[in-house]
Amino acid sequence: MGKQPEDQKKRVRVRDPEQKKADIIDAAARLFAQKGVAATTMREIASESGAGLGLVTYHFKDKNDILSAVMLDKVVAEMGTVLAAEYNHSGNSKERLERLFSAYAEIETDNPLLMILALRGLLRLVEGEENPMIDVFMERLNAITKIVEDGMAAGEFKDIRPEFFSTLFLATLMMQPVANLVAGRYPGQAVVQMSNEDNLRLFKDVILNGIEKD
C-alpha cells in the first residue's frame, strides 16, 4: 500500500483532535442529562467518550469548563429557529408570540436531550451554582418582554408587567418536558404526557387570550 500524501496526513492530524473534543462534549451532554453535573465525574466523561482522562483534561481544565462547552455547543446550535422568530416582525404581537412559542416547542420535540440540559441548568441556579447560559437566557427573556411591550403600545394587550409575562412564557415551555418526565416515571397517575399541540393550545387559549384587550 502506498504512503499517504503529506497534505492528507496533515488534514487527518488536524481533524482528529477536533473530533475527539466533539466526542467528549457529546459524552458529557449525555451524562449531565442522565445524572446531573455534580454526580458526573471527569473519569466517567473520559470513559463514555472513549478518550483517555489525559485527553479530557488537555481540552478542558475542569468539569465546569466542559459544562460551558456543552451548553454553548448544544443550546446555541439550536437557537437558529428561535432567533429567526424573534426577529420576524410580521403580523401583530400575538402572532409573533405564537410563532416564537412554536419555535421553542419544535426544539423540545427535536432535541429532548437539550431540554433536559436546560432543566439541569435551572437547577444549578437553585443550587447557587454558575450557569454558563445565563446571558443567553436573559437575552431570550428580554426579546419576549419587547414583543409584549410592542403589543401594549399598539393597544393589543392589557396593561401588565411584561417582564413577568416573559418568565411565564418560558415556564410554560418548561412545563411540557417536566410533565412528560413525571408521566413517564409515574404512569397512570394524575400527570399525563403533553404534546407540542397541547402546550401551544394552552398557551394560546389561557395565557395569550388572558392578556388580550377585550
Image (cartoon, rainbow, N blue to C red):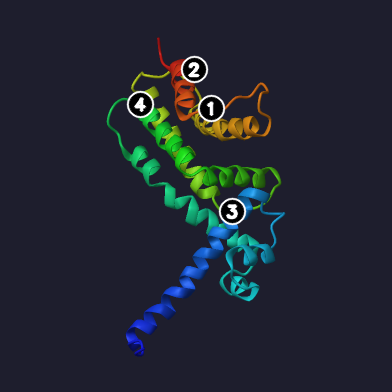
The numbered disc on residue 213 is none
Which mark sits nearer the N-terminus, 2 or 4? Answer: 4
Quadrant where the C terminus lies? top left
Say what amino acid the circle numbered 4 marks.
Ser
The answer to whether marks 4 and 1 mark residues whose Cβ atoms lie closer than 8 Å is: no
What residue did someone put label 2 on?
A: 206
How packed mark 2 is, by other alpha carbons closer than 10 Å (few <14, some 14-19, many 20 or more), is few
Report, in whole angstroms, how far the alpha carbon at label 3 lies from the one at label 2. Answer: 35 Å
Which mark sits nearer the N-terminus, 3 or 2? Answer: 3
What residue did someone put label 3 on?
A: 30
Above or below, comparing residue 114 to residue 15 in the picture: above
Q: Residue at x 44, y 16 (%)?
A: 209
Say what amino acid the circle numbered 3 marks.
Arg
Above or below, comparing residue 99 to residue 137 in the picture: above
Above or below, comparing residue 90 to residue 156 in the picture: below
208 or 192: nearer the viewer: 192
Above or below, comparing residue 187 to residue 43 in the picture: above
What residue did someone put label 4 on?
A: 93
Horizontal and vertical percent position of residue 188: 66, 23
Which mark sits nearer the N-terminus, 2 or 1? Answer: 1
Q: Residue at x 54, y 50 (%)?
A: 133
Total label count?
4
Report, in whole angstroms, how far the alpha carbon at label 4 lies from the one at label 3. Answer: 37 Å
Q: Residue furthest front?
A: 1
Quadrant where the N terminus lies? bottom left
What residue did someone put label 1 on?
A: 194
Report the mark closest to the observer, 2 or 1: 1
